[in-house]
């Protein structure tokens, strides 16, 4: 910013909220050094744990990186020595502020800091996290928010990816499971219309979406094979 | 009979007004006003203790670690957690880094400009200055010739930048007494200190994610887990700061004293001290902390801390009139602000008046050192005795109870903390080598009451909270400067800093430099208020209530 003004002699570009775009146009999550572990589904579930030592992703401990727009992970603090996530602390979204609405501040929006919230916010959108796991239908949500269950499906991610139906941690540790697999889910379509579906309907839709993706990429043969596998799996469950 | 007013007091953290009645060149009465309301107690209501530890840090950008620490200790007491040994050491390192940052910044960049005149340094011979530095044993890392050239350029351009607006010409030019050579040395160290305080904060950043407002200190321990790379960086930073502190700070202090000896004779204050103790040892006992807890009554008589004796009075502060004269913050805490007007006969500050056993008390580095001295902490006893002997007043601990004594004693504490930091890194490495991998413990209950007795760099810090079903149902804080800048009590007794100012000689009513030295010796911190001063029209203030400033 100072380089812009003092050395380059230009004023910084501002975004729609009149904040400097350089700082506030990308999320903490976009540039997070632990992002790779998020993609791999490798998470820290307890402060100061073995997973923390490995530098895993802090999402289950409430990290607000996905919905906080700031460039902390790029600039880092105290002479680029470190930043919150590098030291083991989830982002608490402390730069969240709206000059026109003093009620919309980082404390009101983000407390309790170290828990995942039922709803996530971005601008005027309040979205159920489950909606975000939806690959093909949850476009509006997927463009801005991410859910730890799966991986966002956006323009940047080409190719097929199977969403986790159950988190690997939860399968291994049912007593400390983080996910709720029985609750109703909200699906938000491209136009922003939301529909409530049961958990079963939701996972059926997830499977169907995945088959659609495979059909589009690998052709009808592969999709058919997958459909057949699905049937067998279902048969086995019954 | 004249009024002398300093408003705002600069080179402090926060917003402070000092009004003095001057009779025959000496302060005869005094009123100190803290000009900003914080109300952090109200913000944390109904939130979790872990949230509170993050939120209350925002009280202050200089000592956030202490607030996080004190809030976490309160939560740990309330929820019955004893933190793991690794977390204890890492938290000590975090707190120590903040002390180093704060003390270096305060001595060189906030307090020293009351004694050091960089403009006068232009007259120095750099060669003589170098010889003088060698003879007083202080460090010479800066190229003094180059520094003098740089200062001359500033002065010739009439752009004094950071050195503008000080009272170098107070008392008709007699206010500043150092020879030009010593001014040059101390100006060099002023600039070095800017780098060193940033390095100290790098340690906080390394362990806490960022500074100010660290992220890893939570009720239950720490989120930070050291890796080999982090330990490597930590070790080198800790040593670099120690080397600079050990070769510079105490030596500079002793070199200054002969030129301001009169400042050892006034500014004593109430002569009673509180220290809640800081830097936990393995026993987790307040009285065994590296800087232990204790109360010094009249005559420096040592007693253990008794929470029931802490009470607050608000009769001269901007709070709703209260039927209860003295409130214990833990059992009867109340924050009910009501601004009336600035009236020294009635209410004149946002600061409450805390008292211990009915009497006002001084908090701060001097309090901690005196308690440590009385409790026989070897490093402190040796250093204080050594300093008094060097100054030619062996055994006269009362000499420290003065403006310059309070200012000088802090450098001993800085040296102590800098050397402890090295010990703690070694201790942490030993613990990790021994296979200890625990850093955090979950609470076993979600309700309880707890108090965090701790110390910020500026003195005794107290957070007390009630937790019900995981949420805070009551929270009260007494920050160190609340003790020091307390207004008059119910019987009209002035607060500690007010008492310290009474009796201070004022040779210049417009620029009462000795009063300013006394105020700075307490390192007041009234926390970040937004204040506006208008150079065109003189001094002007608004009470700003919006976080976005004045519309």
Image (cartoon, coloured by chain):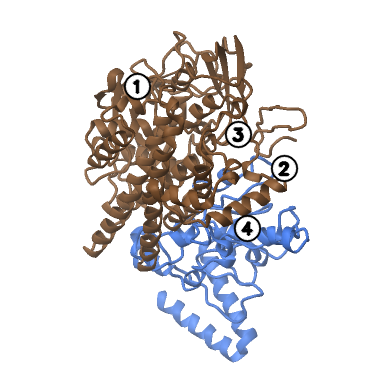
Q: Quadrant of residue B252?
A: top left
Label 3 Cα neighbours within 10 Å, binned few <14 / some 14-19 / many ≥20: many
Q: Nearer the viewer, mark 3 or mark 4?
A: 3
Identify the residue at image location x=46%, y=29%.
B481
Tags 1 and 3 on a common chain: yes
Pointer 1 with pointer 3, Cβ within 8 A:
no
Instruction: Using the image, determine if residue A188 lies above or below residue B454.
Output: below
Q: Chain of mark 4?
A: A
Q: In which image quadrant can residue A212 be found?
A: bottom right
Q: Determine which quarter of the picture holds residue B452.
A: top left
Dot 3 falls on a residue whose secondary structure is loop
Vertical placement of B48 versus B313: above or below?
below
Q: Which chain does blue denote in the image?
A: A
Q: Which of the pair B91/A89 is nearer the observer?
A: B91
Residues at marks 2 and 3 touching, judged by CB atoms closer than 8 Å: no
Q: Count neighbours of disc 4 (C-alpha within 10 A) and say few if under 14, some if 14 to 19, many if 20 or more.
A: many
Q: CA distance from mark 2 to mark 4?
A: 18 Å
Q: Are dots 2 and 4 in contact, CB under 8 Å?
A: no
Which residue, given by chain and number where applicable, does mark 1 sit on?
B272
Percent position of residue B55, x then y: 50, 42
Q: Quadrant of the C terminus of chain B?
A: top right
What label sits on residue A100 in the rendered view? 2
**What is the secondary structure assignment of the residue under circle 4?**
loop
Mark before the other along the chain sequence, 2 or 4: 4
Labels 1 and 4 share a subunit: no
Which chain's residue wears label 1? Answer: B
Camera-nearest residue between B414 and B286: B414
Mark 4 sits on what residue? Answer: A69
Image height check: is A157 above or below B314? below
């Amino acid at each position: 910013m100072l380089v812009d003004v003092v050395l380059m002699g230009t004023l910084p570009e501002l975004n729609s909220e009149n904040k400097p775009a350089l700082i506030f146009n990308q999320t903490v999550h976009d540039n997070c050094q632990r992002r790779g572990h998020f993609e791999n589904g490798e998470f820290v579930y307890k402060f100061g744990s073995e997973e923390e030592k490995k530098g895993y992703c802090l999402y289950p401990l409430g990290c607000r990186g996905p919905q906080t727009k700031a460039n902390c992970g790029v600039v880092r603090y105290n002479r680029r020595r470190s930043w919150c996530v590098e030291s083991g602390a989830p982002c608490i979204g402390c730069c969240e502020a709206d000059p026109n609405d003093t009620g919309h501040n980082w404390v009101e929006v983000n407390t309790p800091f170290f828990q995942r919230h039922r709803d996530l916010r971005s601008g005027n959108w309040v979205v159920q996290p489950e909606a975000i796991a939806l690959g093909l239908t949850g476009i509006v949500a997927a463009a801005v928010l991410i859910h730890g269950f799966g991986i966002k499906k956006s323009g940047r991610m080409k190719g097929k990816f199977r969403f986790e139906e159950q988190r690997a941690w939860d399968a291994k540790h049912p007593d400390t499971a983080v996910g709720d697999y029985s609750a109703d889910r909200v699906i938000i379509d491209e136009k922003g219309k939301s529909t409530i579906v049961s958990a079963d309907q939701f996972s059926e839709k997830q499977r169907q979406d995945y088959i659609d993706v495979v059909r589009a990429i690998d052709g009808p043969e592969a999709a058919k094979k997958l459909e057949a596998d699905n049937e067998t799996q279902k048969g086995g469950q019954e | 009979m004249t009024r002398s007013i300093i408003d705002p007091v600069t080179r402090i953290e926060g917003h402070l007004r000092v009004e003095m009645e001057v009779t025959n060149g000496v302060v005869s009465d005094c009123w100190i006003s803290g000009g900003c309301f914080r109300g952090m107690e109200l913000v944390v209501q109904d939130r979790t203790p872990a949230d509170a530890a993050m939120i209350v840090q925002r009280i202050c950008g200089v000592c956030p670690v202490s607030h996080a620490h004190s809030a976490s200790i309160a939560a740990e007491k309330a929820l019955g957690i004893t933190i793991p040994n690794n977390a204890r050491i890492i938290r000590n390192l975090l707190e120590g880094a903040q002390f180093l940052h704060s003390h270096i910044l305060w001595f060189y960049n906030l307090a020293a400009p009351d004694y050091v005149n960089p403009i006068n340094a232009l007259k120095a011979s750099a060669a003589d200055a170098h010889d003088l530095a060698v003879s007083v044993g202080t460090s010479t890392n800066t190229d003094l010739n180059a520094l003098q050239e740089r200062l001359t350029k500033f002065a010739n351009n009439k752009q004094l930048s950071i050195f503008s607006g000080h009272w170098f010409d107070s008392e008709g030019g007699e206010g500043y007494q150092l020879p030009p050579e010593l001014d040059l040395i101390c100006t060099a160290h002023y600039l070095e200190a800017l780098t060193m305080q940033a390095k100290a904060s790098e340690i906080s950043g390394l362990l806490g994610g960022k500074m100010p407002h660290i992220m890893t200190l939570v009720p239950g321990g720490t989120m930070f887990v050291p890796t080999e790379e982090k330990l490597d960086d930590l070790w080198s930073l800790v040593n670099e700061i120690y080397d600079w502190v050990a070769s510079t700070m105490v030596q500079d202090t002793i070199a200054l004293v002969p030129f301001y000896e009169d400042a050892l004779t006034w500014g004593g204050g109430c002569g009673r001290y509180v220290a809640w103790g800081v830097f936990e040892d393995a026993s987790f006992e307040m009285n065994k902390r590296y800087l232990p807890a204790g109360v010094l009554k009249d005559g420096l008589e040592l007693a253990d801390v008794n929470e029931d004796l802490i009470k607050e009075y608000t009769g001269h502060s901007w709070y709703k009139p209260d039927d209860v004269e003295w409130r214990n913050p833990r059992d009867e805490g109340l924050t009910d602000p009501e601004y009336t007007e600035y009236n020294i006969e009635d209410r004149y500050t946002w600061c409450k008046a805390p008292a211990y056993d009915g009497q006002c008390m001084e908090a701060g580095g001097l309090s901690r050192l005196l308690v440590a001295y009385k409790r026989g902490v070897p490093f402190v006893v040796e250093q204080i005795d050594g300093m008094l002997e060097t100054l030619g007043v062996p055994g006269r601990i009362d000499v420290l109870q003065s403006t310059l004594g309070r200012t000088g004693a802090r450098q001993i504490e800085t040296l102590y903390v800098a050397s402890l930091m090295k010990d703690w890194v070694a201790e942490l490495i030993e613990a990790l080598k021994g296979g200890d991998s625990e850093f955090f413990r979950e609470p076993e209950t979600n309700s309880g009451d707890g108090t965090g007795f701790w110390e910020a760099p500026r003195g005794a810090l107290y957070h007390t909270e009630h937790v019900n079903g995981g949420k805070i149902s009551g929270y009260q804080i007494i920050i160190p400067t609340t003790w020091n800048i307390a207004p008059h009590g119910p019987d009209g007794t002035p607060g500690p800093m007010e008492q310290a100012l009474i009796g201070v000689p004022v040779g210049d009513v417009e620029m009462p430099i000795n009063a300013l030295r006394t105020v700075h010796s307490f390192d007041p911190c009234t926390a970040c208020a937004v204040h506006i001063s208008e150079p065109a029209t003189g001094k002007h203030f608004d009470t700003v209530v919006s976080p976005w400033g004045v519309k």
